[in-house]
Image (cartoon, rainbow, N blue to C red):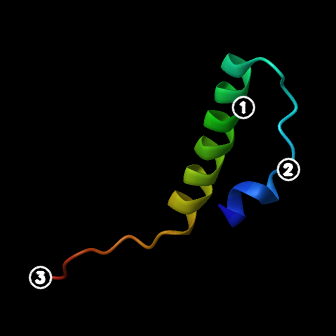
Amino acid sequence: MNCLKRFGEWIVSRDPDRQTAEFQIRITIMNAFTALGRAEIEAIT
């Protein structure tokens, strides 16, 4: 939740559907950054 707040403290939209979309966009961005920082492990044979 702390990482989610770094993208902005407030929800800009007032419509509940737009608020949901806003959160989904933020979570997608966080997941993309997490994927970039994750190490890929390969087995050496």
Q: Which residue is mark 2?
A: 8
**Type of amino acid at the residue the image marks with label 2:** Gly
Name the residue rendered at 56%, 68% in the picture: 37
Residue 19 position in % (x across, y down): 72, 27
Q: Are marks 2 and 1 in contact (CB under 8 Å)?
A: no
Query: Along the horizontal axis of the image, is 17 left or right of 41?
Result: right
Going from N to C along the chain, the mark reached first, 1 or 3, is: 1
**Residue situated in front as seen by the camera: 32 or 5:** 5
Residue 45 position in % (x across, y down): 11, 82
**Residue situated in front as seen by the camera: 11 or 32:** 11
Q: Which mark is residue 45?
A: 3
Q: Which mark is residue 22?
A: 1
Q: Are marks 1 and 3 in contact (CB under 8 Å)?
A: no
Q: Quadrant of the N terminus?
A: bottom right
User: Is 20 above or below relative to 9?
Assistant: above
Residue 22 position in % (x across, y down): 72, 31
Name the mark nearer the viewer: 3 or 2.
2
The crowding category of the residue bearing disc 2, from other C-alpha atoms within 10 Å (few below 14, some 14 to 19, many at least 20), is: few
